[in-house]
Image (cartoon, rainbow, N blue to C red):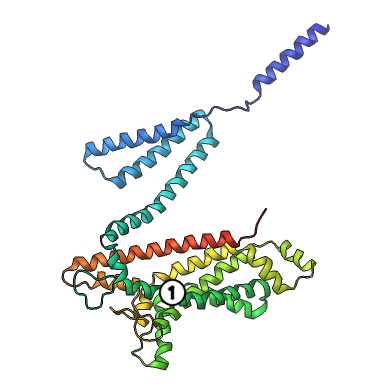
Amino acid sequence: MSIDTERSEGAQATKATAQAPSLVRAELPRWMPWAVLGGALVVLGALLSATGAFSIAGWLVASAVVYAIATYVISRAVEGRRKATDRVVTIVVTVAFLIALTPLVSVVITVVGNGLARFDAEFFNSSMRGVIGAGGGGYHAIIGTLLITALAAVMSIPVGLLTAVYLVEYGKGRLARAITFFVDVMTGIPSIVAGLFAFALFALFFGPGVRLGFGGSVALSVLMIPVVVRATEEMLKIVPNELREAAYALGTPKWRTITKVVIPTSIAGIASGVTLAIARVIGETAPLLIIAGLTTALNFNPFEGRMATLPVFAYTSYAAPGVPREPYLDRAWTAALVLIIIVLVLNLVARLIARLFAPKTR
């Protein structure tokens, strides 16, 4: 009796085990997606070449579509619907990233390829004063860009930082809502409006023909302040309230909590926001063309006379070149390359500041 019972229980257990879903599913080898991608590229490249309709863009788009469809079909047959869907979504995200990266890579390659022609010592130590045709450089424009942007940063960073601290730590009621509204409005104003504002402001005191480097700094600060406010505000908001409450529990005043706890905790994001704001304004052309003007001579005094800047220098060299055209176009591309390098250096400095002043975790 007991033997038959044991046999019956064993048979039932075997049957249940056979009916239970397996926890280990089949999985495609790691080389399979690459093989499918390579096959799609080769086959579609051959087909498009045979039909005479080959183009790089069409080839890549068609290969991506075929690759996604083939991957889904193969994965669905081997791994199941969920894994197949996951693979297709991964492909879509990767393709979107590559599409977004393509213009950036194209711009960098184009600017570097054309800007190296005049990326020499003469470009960095000579101006365009008395130069017609070949020769000369953008030393005066580099100095003007650095001075005007530095003045704009000196005016914008403290105002933006303190405004963000007020909105997050103190702001309540109508005043805070009004400031937030105006910051949102200023974030979207065209750069030409900032230039016209600065020109109208200084024309009230110096006449309609005024051209000042400091006026360009004021125009850039109008564009820079809302970016600093918004970036700093978002960084301050993500600081945990527990840190503030712990400081208050120890009897620390609110102002000291902000300066010793809140700001150091978010300094990495604040530095990134400030760098983003500087990069936002350093390449502006319209406001500087209106209020700072253009000159071929070197000017170290932003409070007197016109000042050349790299964006305006590049624009005028490209839009209204002299004869012959090639030297002017080469200088325009080199000025654009120098602007990219300056923005790259600013990003590296921001990362260094964030690393030096970030709170230590050990």
Residue 291 seen in the current view:
yes
Q: Nearer the viewer, residue 202 or 136?
A: 136
Residue 356 occupies which quadrant of the picture? bottom right
Q: Is residue 56 left or right of residue 238?
A: left
Dot 1: element: helix
| Vertical relation: 285 (above or below) 25 | below
Disc 1: CA contacts within 10 A as few (<14), some (14-19) or many (>=20):
many
Q: Residue at x 24, y 66 (%)?
A: 329
Q: Is residue 351 left or right of residue 254?
A: left
| Vertical relation: 69 (above or below) 357 | above
Q: Position of residue 40 (x, y in %)?
A: 35, 35
Residue 288 occupies which quadrant of the picture? bottom left
Q: Position of residue 260 (x, y in %)?
A: 68, 68
Q: Nearer the viewer, residue 316 or 300?
A: 300
Residue at the extreme left: 323
Residue 148 occupies which quadrant of the picture? bottom left
Residue at the extreme right: 1
Q: Nearer the viewer, residue 2 or 290?
A: 290
Q: Residue at x 54, y 77 (%)?
A: 182
Residue 190 seen in the current view:
no
Q: Position of residue 20 (x, y in %)?
A: 66, 24
Instruction: Tell me the quarter of the image containing the N terminus.
Output: top right
Q: Position of residue 344 (x, y in %)?
A: 43, 61
Q: Is residue 181 left or right of residue 333?
A: right
| Vertical relation: 49 (above or below) 124 | above
Q: Residue at x 63, y 77 (%)?
A: 176
Query: Mark 1 = which residue?
Result: 149
- The number of numbered discs placed on residues in the rendered structure image is 1
Hey, what amino acid is under mark 1?
A: Thr
